[in-house]
Amino acid sequence: MEATYQPGLENVIASETAISYLDVEQGEIVLRGYDLIELANKVTYLDIVGLLLDGVLPDAEQRRSLEQKLIAEYEFPQNVLTMLQLLPKQSNLMDVLRTGISAIACYDEELEDRSRDANYRKSIRLLAKVPQIVANGYRAVTKQSFIEPRPDLSYSGNFLYMITGKVPPETEEKVFDQSLIVYSEHEMPNSTFAARVIASTQSDMYGALSGAVASLKGTLHGGANEAVMKFLLEAGSVEEMESLILNKLARKERMMGFGHRVYMKKADPRAVLMREALAQLAREKNREDLYNMCVIGEEVMNREKKLFPNLDYYAAPVYYLLGIPIDLFTPVFVAARTIGIAAHVIEQHANNRLFRPRVLYTGLRGLHPQT
Ligand code: ACO
């Protein structure tokens, strides 16, 4: 077969999958046959977990059973929390999360079992424990007391409660749940690819997820949501927003939260949904100024660069208004994406072919060591 080279693997088909597909022409993110945005408006994150793991949306009974399975896995190894407390205060919370995921792997008796059933159970364990690493990992390094998960709250309600220490009002829980849905799965981003590459060696799900966390830390990927919020706080007002963006572009810097390898010159449907969520939240919290800043930013970027916002641009201010610390924005993204990555690892293990590409060699040849 003739080898071709595409820098950044742009437009290269890396895998077959029945999990999700970005149909850019139709403006649809297909998730196991459904439109992700329609799902985000009609079902809950727990339903998405069922859909991604079982291939079908759960009915009421199946949803209850899934919830019970998750609650049964809430128990968390305290030694891991003690270990995270030893990390320095300035630790990046993505590194704390990656460390926590690696550590809990050591407590999973089924770690080396790659069968579908064992991988399914590991996915449930990770879904139950990753939000706890996110919330209590933050508490560990900031020397705050830990918060126990509350099985009487919904999955998303408990996650937000563990982060903020307050049971969220229903409207805020709903917005957070929607954000988890739109972050849950997105075809073959860098992190999912990294996870599949790792899984293709027959390595385990925890290792694949840890690799994906490292990928998501970068500002060209998940790390963008934190960078967006820092930029919005720096701008501080609608008036400053435009001039700050123009200065940035004049310096040939990238504006975080804009552009996307696959959508590029088209709107990211997830950003459109989160913009609506932000509008509602900003009204409720009397922070229309923040919403207006974002809209101005969108207009300027469209006018100057013909670029559209991606999900991170609107998820950032939504998380800010929900009271989530900025350093946790990307870890929350990871928690939401855990189910997507788990589904990809299961699929990779079920029909595996080792990833092993070639290179276009540009180095020297024919050298010999001096003897
Ligand atoms: N700000 C300014 N210019 C941009 C931006 C941006 N955010 N994104 C792309 N461009 C410009 C590039 O400078 C380039 O311009 P040129 O042709 O004049 O040199 C052109 O658009 C094409 O950019 P590429 O770098 O080739 O596009 P690529 O597909 O590699 O980039 C990426 C995609 C990395 C997401 C890019 O748009 C970017 O850096 N965005 C900011 C980071 C970000 O928001 N990441 C989150 C992604 S979504 C997610 O992870 C949930």
Image (spheres, rainbow, N blue to C red):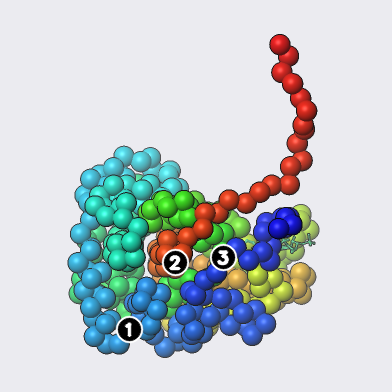
Asked whether disc 2 touches disc 1, contact meaning CB atoms under 8 Å apart, the reply is: no
Circles 3 and 1: CB atoms closer than 8 Å: no
Which residue is rendered at x = 23% and y = 56% of the image? 76
Q: Position of residue 364 (x, y in %)?
A: 77, 32
10 Å neighbourhood of mark 2: few (<14), some, or many (≥20)? many
Q: Is residue 146 left or right of residue 88?
A: left
Give the SS element for disc 2.
Answer: helix
Q: How much space separates mark 2 and mark 1, taking CA atoms?
A: 20 Å
Q: Measure the alpha-carbon separation of dots 2 and 3.
A: 10 Å
Q: Residue shown at 28%/70% (left/top)?
A: 158
Checking the image for residue 347, the label placed there is 2
Q: Along the horizontal axis of the image, is 172 left or right of 191?
A: left
Q: Residue at x 49, y 79 (%)?
A: 31
| Quadrant position of residue 52 | bottom left
Tell me the quadrant of the picture where the N terminus can be found.
bottom right
x and y percentages locating residue 325 in the rendered image: 42, 60
**The quarter of the picture showing ligand 1:** bottom right
Please indicate, yes or no, whether residue 284 appears anywhere in the rendered image: yes
In the image, taking residue 70 as reference, residue 302 lies left or right, namely right
Q: Quadrant of residue 48?
A: bottom left
Give the image quarter of residue 231. bottom right
Q: Mark 3 or mark 2, which is nearer the start of the sequence?
A: 3
| Residue type at tag 1 | Pro
Give the Cα separation between the discs numbered 3 and 1. Answer: 27 Å
* Mark carried by residue 15: 3
Q: Position of residue 236 (x, y in %)?
A: 58, 65
Depth check: give the residue in front, 174 or 370: 370
Amino acid type indicated by mark 3: Ser
Q: Nearer the viewer, residue 277 or 155?
A: 155
Q: Which mark is residue 43?
A: none
Query: Can you identify the residue that label 1 sits on?
Result: 58
Q: Disc 2 vs disc 3: Cβ atoms closer than 8 Å?
A: no
